[in-house]
Image (tube, rainbow, N blue to C red):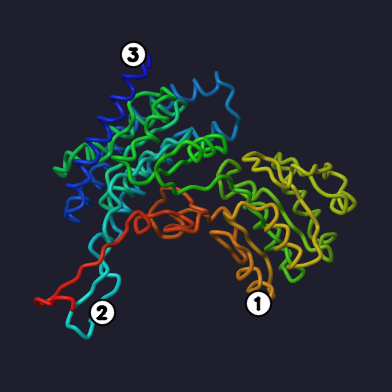
Amino acid sequence: MTAKTEDITILMRDLGLAARDAAQTLAVASTEAKNRALTEAAASLRENQQAILTANIKDLAGGEQKGLSVAMIDRLMLNNERIEAMAGGLEAIAALPDPVGTSLAQWDRPNGLHFERVRTPLGVIGVIYESRPNVTADAGALCLKAGNAVILRGGSESFHSSSAIASCLSDGLRAANLPVAAIQLVPTPDRAAVGEMLRLSEYIDVIVPRGGKSLIQRVTDESRIPLFKHLEGICHTYIDVAADPAMARKVAFNAKMRRTGVCGAMETLLVHQDVAAAILPGIVDDLTEAGCQVRGDGASMAIDGRIACATDDDWDTEYLDSILSVRLVGGVDDAIRHIAEHGSRHTDAIITEDAAAAQKFLNQVDSAIVMVNASTQYADGGEFGMGAEIGISTGKLHARGPVGVEQLTSFKYVVRGTGQCRP
């Protein structure tokens, strides 16, 4: 082990120890103290807006030198509106009900024992993410509201921006007399820190990876700690034979092009073969005018000559870019089969006025989020009324879909008696 590796090992263990100590304080912190920390942090974001933008300029310059894609640069970029959105997100989280201590169920037994299931914090959360600096604010705030300490490991490309944002979160904690170690940003962009973090099972209770497939695959392979994760966001929209054409056109465009680099962006459009000739050309008009490359199967290419030939790999690709694959299907059953074979269990939508088709789609598509007549870009905790999200989980244990405040808690059983002894 080199001296550098030893230093990072010590650094990460020190962060883990401090987080574990802070978690004990946060577990019993008052709702008022947590909310004050969040609102003061929001104020600090606004007060330090220029410093955050200056830090972001450094990250953007570095990203361009590294040759990051347009979508990745968009994820990395901050402006006045995005900083205000972060601040508003903190205030929205502060306004949410405090889940800690909530009674989930109560019952009495014939022997007089009273049982209660009560929400409790998970403890220490580790969040590993790439280019989105806003995750620093969202993840820090959600963990704090749920009574958890958090260790944040942002990507090297967003290091300066995330550091400036984390400083504002620290301001909020100090103002509320809560331990600053409740929200810690790993102070080095060295990739070795990720490996060390994934071994901190003594201190970290859950890891949340947010980023590209390679990052999430690495975390999945190496982590000794349970994960909330999704590997990919291969999201589908199916336009049914009973779809409203104007709605289908509008929703399809938004699902793909509102922001192409988010995990809820549509990557494959499925269109019922009986309405494709009427609906598809207008959708292709909108997409190509916006600079989106459309790839499709033979049937879709026969309808519109602007559609390029899709390969087998296209159906299994999360583009995160202005590229869309299109396939014609025979009906809702075919669409469900395609999603089952090629989807990632993230978010899938149907556009239809047929209630029976919609219900079949909702019942049979095994994804964390299923939608009717809405853009997949709504796959976001903020849009769900959670204030923000720490990520989307496609697993089926504990948390599924947007991971917000409630999903960052567990529970314990509280049993009250009057001296009962088991015979």
Question: Which amino acid lies under the numbered mark 1 shown in the image of this protein?
Answer: Ala
Residue 138 lies left or right of residue 98; in this view the side is right
The kind of secondary structure element at disc 2 is strand
Q: CA distance from mark 1 to mark 3?
A: 64 Å
Give the label on residue 355, or none: 1
Could you say which is closer to the camera, residue 239 or residue 156? 156
Q: Amino acid at mark 2?
A: Trp
- Which residue was labeled with disc 3? 3
For label 3, count other residues whose C-alpha is less than 10 Å away and answer few (under 14), some (14-19) or many (20+).
Answer: few
Q: Earlier in the sequence, mark 1 or mark 3?
A: 3
Q: Residue at x 36, y 49 (%)?
A: 89
Q: Which residue is mark 2?
A: 107
Query: How far across and down, in percent of the image, does residue 352 sit?
Result: 69, 69
Determine the secondary structure under disc 3. Answer: helix
Q: Nearer the viewer, residue 116 or 309?
A: 116
- Mark 1 vs mark 3, foreground winner is 3
Whether residue 175 is situated above or below residue 349 in the rendered picture? above
